[in-house]
Amino acid sequence: MILHTLGYVNVMSDRTKKLGEYDKEFVWHPFTQMKEYGDKDPVVIETGEGAYLIDTEGRKYIDGVSSLWVNIHGHKVPEIDNAIKEQVDRLSHSTLLGVTNPPAAELAKRLIDICPSGLKKVFYSGDGASAVEVALKMAFQYWQLKGRPEKTKFICLENGYHGDTLGAVSVGGIDLFHSAFEPLLFETYQAPSYYCYRCPLSLAYPSCGLACAGRIEEILKEHHDEVAGVIFEPYVQAAGGMIVSPPGYLKKVREYCDQYDVLMILDEVATGFGRTGKMFACEHEDVTPDILVLGKGMTGGYLPLSATVTTERVYSAFLGDYDEFKTFFHGHSYAGNPLSCAASLGNLDAFENNSTLHNLQEKIKYLEDELKEFTGLKHVGDVRNKGFMVGIELVRDKDTQEPYAPGMKMGWKVADLAMEDEVLIRPLGNVVVLMPPIGIPMDDLKKLLRVTYNSIKKATEENSNTST
Ligand code: PLP
């Protein structure tokens, strides 16, 4: 097996070769066309250091998408490493059904301290999708317990993504991922995406007056009696293509939820833990949701852990005598896992010790200045970001906004070129995504941006005459 890198050809070590063979023979990778995967040389990531991932051949890559949006401070963070090591010596797991453990209790207190005011109770799960399921079931049962059993429906957004379990897919809005499962899903009301570059209402901000939010009100006006909640990703529809909402959207939807008495569920699985420049995206507009969903960055990108955080109002509806059966009958085996919760405490310690959010502001400013350069590229149609969540949308024709045909795999062409320059990124269709660890040192951020710029330029110039 031959390994192509940096323009020269290496002979792959026997170990990498063997691991690659095991991988290809036995592993089915998520969101991966395995027919194509088999044609490629494997990249076997073995270690991490700061913003870098290092493979079994010793090549160092900048972790340009935070190991799929989870990593926060970088790899090998002393606070998190030590928290896990110390916890392993005490206890690795004990159930949260009816008993507790120190990291789970302490973490819940610290999460409530940093969450928007009004949020009081933490329900733990493992992955983001599970925490979304919890949010949906919690909202659904809440209305039953409040004597409003007809409130069973959810409003969600086109281009929304909340994970891959069936409830989460039901409230998702990405046809490519979701349409195959249509017959298995429950019905929802879908409002338009807040996608200004390709406005589904053919309007322009700010003269639109946030008409996309207005559509939510129209649905509520007609159907609020049967709506349990509105669920969406605040400020950035991440998997939908790093689509950034215009300011004011969030607050407006909060007002509609209050006006029509439905629960507001904000999915901050991707946006949470500093990614948008504040600890949580909803802080940009001082909005407290009724249910906040957290995951991904919660452990700094170390271990699976998620949470569904809610208010006293929602929580107290579930209180009653044993035989009233108001209990929330939902739980996962590893809920509140002590190792994951210890990692999450280490993550919060690292935020404090490194003044992460404070230091991030300068990096966001630098990033935004540099991104202006990208808009000058011939095939860059839109450059958008909220904090460290960046989407660079490539188009075949800038004037008409005509997208590249999927078969051109333009996003992947860019990512493959970046890989040759030791930058690891993963696109979403024609959108080049950057979401480095927020703790990335400035020099590495500079390299990430330079390599991405050059890769876009090269990939689009090389393919500018191709039409398929
Ligand atoms: N919600 C949002 C906004 C996400 O971006 C994701 C994953 O990308 C999820 C939920 C699902 O999280 P997980 O992959 O941990 O199940």
Image: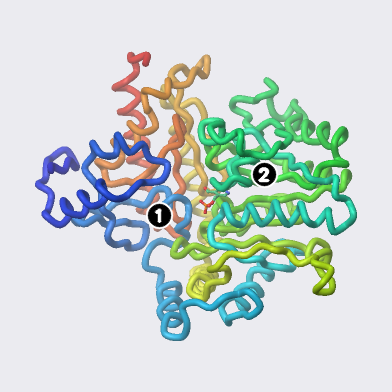
Q: Left or right: 114 with respect to 85?
A: right
**Mark 2 element type:** strand
The amino acid pointed to by label 1 is Met
Observer able to see residue 288 = no
Q: Quadrant of the N terminus?
A: top left
Q: Position of residue 341 (x, y in %)?
A: 53, 72
Q: Position of residue 254 (x, y in %)?
A: 79, 47
Residue shown at the point (51%, 15%) measured from the top left: 399
**Residue neighbourhood size for the residue with mark 1, other residues' Cα within 10 Å, grouped as few (<14), some (14–19), many (≥20):** some
Q: Position of residue 378 (x, y in %)?
A: 41, 22
Residue shown at the point (53%, 63%) measured from the top left: 305
Q: Quadrant of the C terminus?
A: top left
Between 246 and 201, the one nearer to me in the picture: 201
Residue on which the image places disc 2: 232
Q: CA distance from mark 1 to mark 2?
A: 32 Å
The amino acid pointed to by label 2 is Phe
Q: Residue 256 got which mark? A: none
Residue shown at the point (33%, 38%) measured from the top left: 34
Q: Residue 442 got which mark? A: 1
- Foreground disc of the pair 1, 2: 2
The image quadrant that residue 156 belongs to is top right
